[in-house]
Image: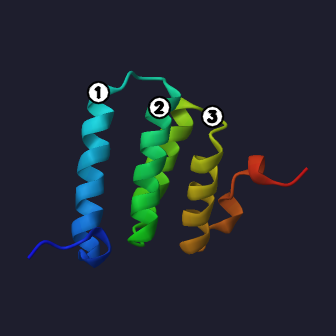
Amino acid sequence: MKLKNDELPSNFAFNRNLRRYNKALEMTLAGTEERASLYSNRAACYLMENKYQDAIRESTLALETVPNFKAALMRRSRAYEQIGRAVQVDPRLTPV
């Protein structure tokens, strides 16, 4: 029996997505917005699995590549909030 994506166990989809992002990272150039997006997407995977330290690491990699990458800023801030370190929320996210 073949399962649809929404019927797959969470950890299966998580591992599959991480493998895909890892493969894509192998094929992208360093310093590109595409690479930052892939790191940020991996951070999103980790957030969904409550792996906040991993999400912070991946978001930071994205921000080292593209410093004002909004999705990575949001994901890193969300991860910091979840581990009780909201004081480290990035000031670039403050409303103007």
State the separation of the CA atoms marked 1 and 2.
10 Å
Instruction: Please tell me whether mark 3 sits on a helix, a strand or a loop.
Output: loop
State the separation of the CA atoms marked 1 and 3.
21 Å
Q: Earlier in the sequence, mark 1 or mark 3?
A: 1
In the figure, residue 7 lies in which quadrant? bottom left
**Left or right: where does residue 80 sit relative to residue 43?**
right
Instruction: Please tell me whether mark 2 sits on a helix, a strand or a loop.
Output: helix
Amino acid identity at mark 3: Pro
Q: Are marks 1 and 3 in contact (CB under 8 Å)?
A: no
Question: What residue do we see at 46% from left, 65% from top?
Answer: 47
* Total numbered labels placed on residues in the image: 3
Instruction: Please tell me whether mark 1 sits on a helix, a strand or a loop.
Output: helix
Marks 1, 3: nearer the viewer: 1
Q: Are marks 1 and 2 in contact (CB under 8 Å)?
A: no
State the separation of the CA atoms marked 3 and 2.
13 Å
Image location of residue 28, percent across then percent down: 35, 26
**Left or right: where does residue 71 sit relative to residue 9?**
right
Question: What residue do we see at 27% from left, 46% from top?
Answer: 20
57, 30: nearer the viewer: 30
Amino acid identity at mark 2: Glu
Say which residue label 3 marks: 67
In the figure, residue 82 lies in which quadrant? bottom right
Image location of residue 5, percent across then percent down: 28, 68
**Left or right: where does residue 82 sit relative to residue 17?**
right
Question: What residue do we see at 29% from left, 64% from top?
Answer: 14
Q: Earlier in the sequence, mark 1 or mark 2?
A: 1
Q: Residues within 10 Å of mark 1 (few under 14, many from 20)?
A: few
Q: Quadrant of the N terminus?
A: bottom left
Q: Which mark is residue 27?
A: 1
Q: Earlier in the sequence, mark 3 or mark 2?
A: 2
Say which residue label 2 marks: 34
Question: What residue do we see at 67% from left, 37% from top?
Answer: 68
